[in-house]
Image (cartoon, rainbow, N blue to C red):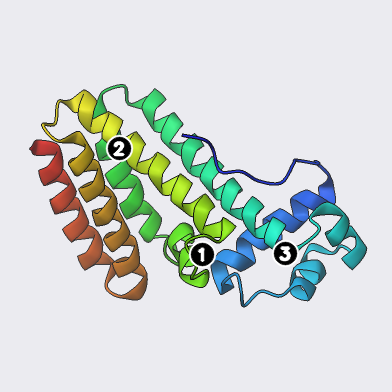
Amino acid sequence: MSDVQTSPSRSSPARARLLAVADDLFYGDGITATGIDRLIAEAQVTKATFYKQYGSKDALILEYIGDRDRQVREALSALLTAHPEPAAVLAAVIDAVVSDTARPDFRGDPFLNAAAEFASPTHPVRIAIARHRDWFTGFLEDRFRELGHPRPGAAADEFSLLRDGAVCGSYAGDAVAATSAFERAAHRLLDA
């Protein structure tokens, strides 16, 4: 599975500021609601610098999605290192989901939020999100396979769907109820 593709990295302080500001604004306020002028003002760069670094808002959006993908992969890699047993890794993922939804700035899943803003499944943002979700489901499937689950692919799909429900339910409704239901159902999958 290939990684999410982003624009070529041209590291600079201005580029890093733009990405950091985009991450905050895209996640907090939404991608389409965040205009280029606001990004430029909050990153304290010129319009010329923005276009030199990214060329377009679409390129920045793709880098945002790619950076979020990288963060998830690094976090799950760290869980694998910290918890060599597959059941412990999956339990740590459950704990991480519950912990994530309890953050005061929690606004749901950044990938699901972005997918909701781009209707066409052929849009580059949706393609990048699909790659990320395929990778995540593959990560889960590998853990369930290592655990000896009789249907690791189905278990990974169910776990992923449970996680999606927990993050959406936590953001839109009662976080305690959503994460409690997620924990019960996810642990039943681990015990199967």
Please determine whether, in this image, residue 183 is positioned above or below residue 47: above
Asked if the residue under mark 1 is in contact with the one under mark 2, i.e. CB atoms within 8 Å, the reply is no
* Mark 1 to mark 3 CA distance (whole Å): 14 Å
Residue 114: give its label: 1
Q: Earlier in the sequence, mark 1 or mark 3?
A: 3
Q: Quadrant of the C terminus?
A: top left
Residue 147: give its label: none
What is the crowding at mark 2: few (fewer than 14 residues within 10 Å), some, or many (at least 20)? many
- Residue, disc 3: 57
Asked if the residue under mark 3 is in contact with the one under mark 1, i.e. CB atoms within 8 Å, the reply is no
Q: Earlier in the sequence, mark 2 or mark 1?
A: 1
Residue 16 seen: yes
Residue 88 seen: no
Q: Residue furthest left?
A: 192
* Mark 3 to mark 2 CA distance (whole Å): 32 Å
> Residue 8 or 84: which is nearer the viewer?
8
Please determine whether, in this image, residue 73 is positioned above or below residue 94: above
Please determine whether, in this image, residue 23 is positioned above or below residue 95: below
